[in-house]
Amino acid sequence: MCTVTIISGGAGQSGVVRVVCNRDESRSRPPAMPPKWREIEGSPGARAIWPMDLEAGGTWIAAADSGLVLCLLNVNPEPPPRLPRSGLESRGLVIPSLIGLRSPQAVVRRLTQTSLKRFAPFRLLAMLGSRAGADVAELRWDRSTLNVAWRSGAAACFVSSGLGDSLAAPRLDLFDEMVASPGPTPDRQDEFHRHQWPDRPEISVLMARADARTVSITTLEVDPTRRNAPITMAYEPVPATQAAVR
């Protein structure tokens, strides 16, 4: 759960919100289950689509037929906080518990009223994907405080790294150079998510190091003009030998 980008609007993309997520995981973690539409527990008749982590049973990205989009990244403070040796729940369970809500504002209200001590630090992104130029609620839990910020604009990038989130900061400048400054398009967004620095693969967007690597790229599109399929999600497993854009 390392690099997430969001673009909305743009040339030929009016009303479309596009989210792409590179998921970085341990090389020993089992492959995830591809995206599938599921009934939302506690919300009769409502559905959402997400891929499932088979080790913990949760997910890192989901979209509901209401238009709500949620995406989660781990937070890795420096120095790392002291975590309890037992009793923590998987952060992947956060999204399934919230995807039945109707808006980012409702997500903010729910989390601010919920005890999060059972979770390690995380950052949750919430947006209404059916709205062009979608405002993104960024909720950051650091084990002591839940901070809420709102982001708006045609392009946004969020990063994390198990080595320490500050080490992933160069990806933000790269995103501005490749996507935001020239004008966000799906092609530029996709090229960014396949970028790797030859001399710095361990902090690259398409990440690779001895114990972990980018294992999948998930692409979510919400396009209200497509009446038959306004929400689509593509899941691409990344082979360890896949060539990168350098």
Image (spheres, rainbow, N blue to C red):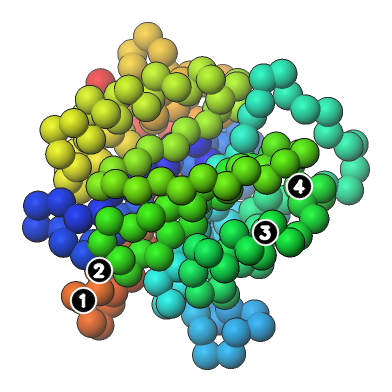
Residue 105 x %, y %:
53, 64
Q: In the rendered structure, which amino acid carries the disc numbered 2?
A: Asp
Mark 3 or 2: in front is: 3
Residue 172 x %, y %:
37, 27
Does dot 4 land on a helix, a strand or a loop? loop
Instruction: Say which mark, if any, is on residue 226.
Output: 1
| Cβ–Cβ under 8 Å for marks 2 and 1 | yes
Asked if 96 appears above or below 214 in the picture, the reply is below
Question: Which residue position holds label 4?
Answer: 119
Question: Which residue position holds label 2?
Answer: 223
Q: In the rendered structure, which amino acid carries the disc numbered 3?
A: Leu
Question: Which residue position holds label 3?
Answer: 111
Q: Which residue occupies 76% across, 47% down?
A: 119
Among the two numbered marks 1 and 3 on one chain, the one whose residue lies closer to the N terminus: 3
Asked if 232 appears above or below 203 in the picture, the reply is below
Q: What residue occupies the far bottom of the structure in this picture?
A: 45
Q: Which residue occupies 15% across, 39% down?
A: 183
Distance of mark 3 from mark 2, alpha carbons? 27 Å
Among the two numbered marks 4 and 1 on one chain, the one whose residue lies closer to the N terminus: 4
Q: In the rendered structure, which amino acid carries the disc numbered 1?
A: Arg
Q: Which is nearer the eye, 169 or 32? A: 169
How crowded is the residue under tag 2: few (<14 C-alpha within 10 Å), some, or many (20+)? many
Q: Which is nearer the eye, 78 or 210? A: 78
How crowded is the residue under tag 4: few (<14 C-alpha within 10 Å), some, or many (20+)? some
Residue 12 x %, y %:
9, 58
Q: Which residue occupies 56% across, 81% down?
A: 39
